[in-house]
Amino acid sequence: AQKVTQAQTEISVVEKEDVTLDCVYETRDTTYYLFWYKQPPSGELVFLIRRNSFDEQNEISGRYSWNFQKSTSSFNFTITASQVVDSAVYFCALSEARGTYKYIFGTGTRLKVLA
Amino acid sequence: NAGVTQTPKFRILKIGQSMTLQCAQDMNHNYMYWYRQDPGMGLKLIYYSVGAGITDKGEVPNGYNVSRSTTEDFPLRLELAAPSQTSVYFCASSDGQQATNEKLFFGSGTQLSVL
């Protein structure tokens, strides 16, 4: 069965620190898709990134970077030089290419960036 | 450029009352979903639909019903509200094109309290 684990319930950092949010997934499929979403205090869910299982290239977007490692079934998210505006709950999600198009979400990591 | 529109944003129900959460999307997406978000529990899939006239249960369907008479609309019905249904409800849609750049687009959420 598919499962997404975000073991870090809450992380607090001081502004300008780097922080990594962990995501470990389980799936039987060889083709699948991984996502990160951000939920700021306003409550909406904002798409950050999608990664296909056959593309293990790491990705960098500004202060954000993602490390995808199939060998450890992990898809970790790093924020460099964190800012107060990064304070949010971050969700990792998995979708299998089985035609059901269902997304399974982790329980989220609440990031607090202190000024 | 509305995307996914959910109404209402907030609602308080008494135990045993019924209500319908409305969801509409204007992106011509075939796939639509209802999730509930409980504190610390991530997002749980209630129901989903892969097209007009087709719906299926997710992880936590008990106490809810859905219908999909058009591509645009995917209402969620609570028949006999219970305190356990106090949650934040999110509607989402996707184009189902997994091989390309498919991702979930979320509505802004409905905060429901059952007292």
Image (tube, helix red, strand yellow):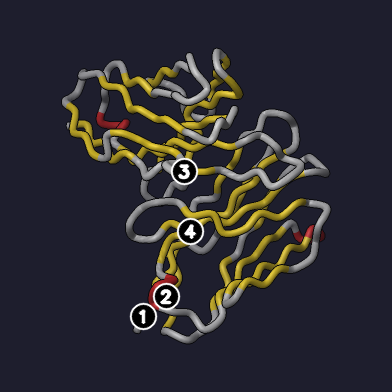
Q: Which residue is mark 2?
A: A12
Which three-letter amino acid code belongs to the residue tagged 1?
A: Leu
Q: Position of residue A46 (x, y in %)?
A: 48, 55
Q: Amino acid at mark 2?
A: Ser
Which amino acid lies under the numbered mark 4 shown in the image of this protein?
Lys
Q: How far apart in space, not on screen, are marks 1 and 2 (Cα)? A: 7 Å
Task: Return the residue at label 4.
Answer: A38
Check disc 1 and report the residue beneath it: A114
Is A15 or B107 nearer to us in this picture? Answer: B107
How far, Cα to Cα, is label 3 from label 2?
27 Å
Q: Residues within 10 Å of mark 1 (few under 14, many from 20)?
A: some
User: Disc 3 residue type?
Assistant: Phe
Give the class, few, some or many, for how many residues have Cα within 10 Å of label 2's Cα (few <14, many ≥20). few
- x 66%, y 56%: residue: A24
In the rendered structure, are the residues bearing label 1 and label 2 in contact, judged by CB atoms less than 8 Å apart? yes
Q: Position of residue A113 (x, y in %)?
A: 40, 76
Q: Single out the residue that lies furthest toward the front.
A: B1
